[in-house]
Image (tube, rainbow, N blue to C red):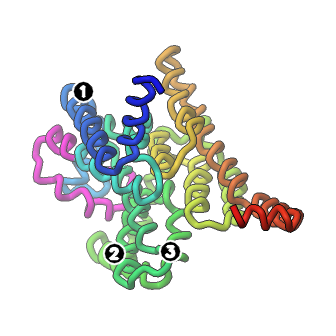
């Protein structure tokens, strides 16, 4: 074994150690934050979420109660200060969210869509963190308190229903009635604070004013439903949840491509990670934003893998292989 091999092995073991993972994540996250502080950015935070944080609930395209999660940033009268604090919160919250859902925090942090999120000052970390919290809360054998707390995650997911709506339904079914306590209370409070017709008012203007609705990678409701039907073929819950999120991304209308970063909260294969960078590399080389549509390859790859590894066909193959394995070979395998 060469010295290089020994160093490589030690580095690999260090990267697999939880403490070093957090150290490296913190260092990279700090560098990203410094870059954001030095460069111009935060256009969406300035145009929408700073206004929401200071009380203008109709200044964004999100449900009015999104204000509850951003209102603390209203203490910053300077939008730029609020933006940088929000970027720090987004970077910090990404780590436990990815750990909870089985993904690589570092891969999620340096994914092109997440870097786009913090560059713009978007709020997608709220539903993403809610997804992780709800998943943690609905685990079998969890306490009643965890089931109730999962409801907070569902409420956070509801701040971007076009991204999390189907995943929210799945997690609500897995969590039972206790997981609906906080969302029900939140709905009641919202009708008191914003009047009973706030949902109708919000729906009246949101679809008409989202500029990205005609981009070619926003497909259609039929494609969305056909894709999501495959979730019924997947038995394990975490792969099914990942499939549902991916299936939503390929067909949900009015969904910013930066929202694709939520896929990286789950475990991704190298090819799937690469698919998240390809459109941005092509845009950088050609200057043509139309390449952004290639980002749809990432959720398609995820869906195909989940069906192949965890779908009904994979289960049937496993059963068939077990039935057709010679007893002597099975015994030998058991002995090993």
Which residue has dot 2 on it?
A: 186
Q: Which residue is drawn at 24% across and 49% down?
A: 89
Percent position of residue 124, x then y: 38, 50
Q: Of the numbered discs in the image, which one, if any, rests on residue 40?
A: 1
Q: Residue at x 37, y 35 (%)?
A: 11
Above or below: residue 107 compared with residue 172? above
In this rendered view, identify the residue nearer to me: 154 or 92: 92
Percent position of residue 49, x then y: 27, 48
Above or below: residue 257 compared with residue 237? above
Q: Residue at x 57, y 34 (%)?
A: 275
- Contact (Cβ within 8 Å) of mark 3 with mark 2: no
Secondary structure of residue under mark 3: helix
Above or below: residue 296 compared with residue 141? above
Q: Which residue is drawn at 42% across and 43% down?
A: 108
Mark 2 or 1, nearer chain start: 1
In this rendered view, identify the residue nearer to me: 57 or 107: 107
> Is disc 1 surrounded by few (<14), some (14 to 19) or many (20+) residues within 10 Å?
few
Check residue 72 for magenta coloring: yes
Percent position of residue 309, x then y: 69, 54
Percent position of residue 158, x then y: 42, 63
């Amino acid at each position: 074994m060469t010295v290089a091999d020994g160093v490589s092995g030690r580095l690999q073991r260090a990267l697999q150690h939880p403490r070093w993972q957090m150290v490296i994540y913190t260092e990279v996250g700090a560098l990203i934050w410094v870059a954001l502080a030095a460069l111009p950015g935060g256009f969406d935070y300035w145009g929408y979420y700073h206004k929401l944080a200071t009380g203008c609930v109709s200044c964004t395209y999100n449900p009015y109660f999104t204000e509850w999660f951003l209102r603390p940033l209203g203490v910053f009268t300077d939008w730029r200060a609020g933006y940088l604090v929000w970027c720090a919160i987004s970077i910090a919250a990404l780590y436990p969210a990815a750990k909870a859902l089985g993904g690589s925090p570092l891969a999620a942090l340096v994914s092109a869509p997440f870097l786009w999120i913090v560059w713009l000052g978007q709020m997608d970390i709220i539903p993403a963190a809610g997804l992780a919290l709800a998943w943690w809360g609905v685990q079998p054998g969890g306490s009643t308190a965890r089931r109730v707390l999962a409801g907070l995650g569902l409420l956070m997911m509801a701040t971007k229903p076009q991204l999390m709506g189907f995943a929210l339904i799945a997690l609500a079914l897995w969590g039972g009635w206790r997981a609906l306590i906080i969302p029900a209370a939140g709905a009641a409070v919202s009708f008191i604070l914003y009047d009973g017709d706030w949902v109708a008012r919000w729906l009246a203007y949101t679809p008409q004013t989202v500029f990205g609705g005609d981009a070619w990678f926003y497909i259609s409701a039929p494609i969305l439903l056909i894709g999501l039907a495959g979730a019924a073929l997947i038995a394990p819950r975490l792969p099914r949840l990942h499939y549902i999120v991916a299936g939503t991304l390929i067909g949900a209308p009015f969904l910013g491509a930066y929202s694709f970063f939520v896929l990286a909260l789950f475990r991704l294969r190298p090819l799937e990670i690469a698919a998240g960078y390809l459109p941005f590399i092509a845009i950088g080389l050609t200057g043509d934003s139309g390449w952004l549509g290639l980002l749809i390859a990432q959720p398609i790859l995820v869906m195909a893998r989940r069906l192949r590894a965890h779908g009904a066909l994979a289960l049937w193959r496993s059963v068939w292989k077990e039935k057709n394995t010679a007893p002597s070979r099975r015994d030998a395998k058991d002995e090993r």
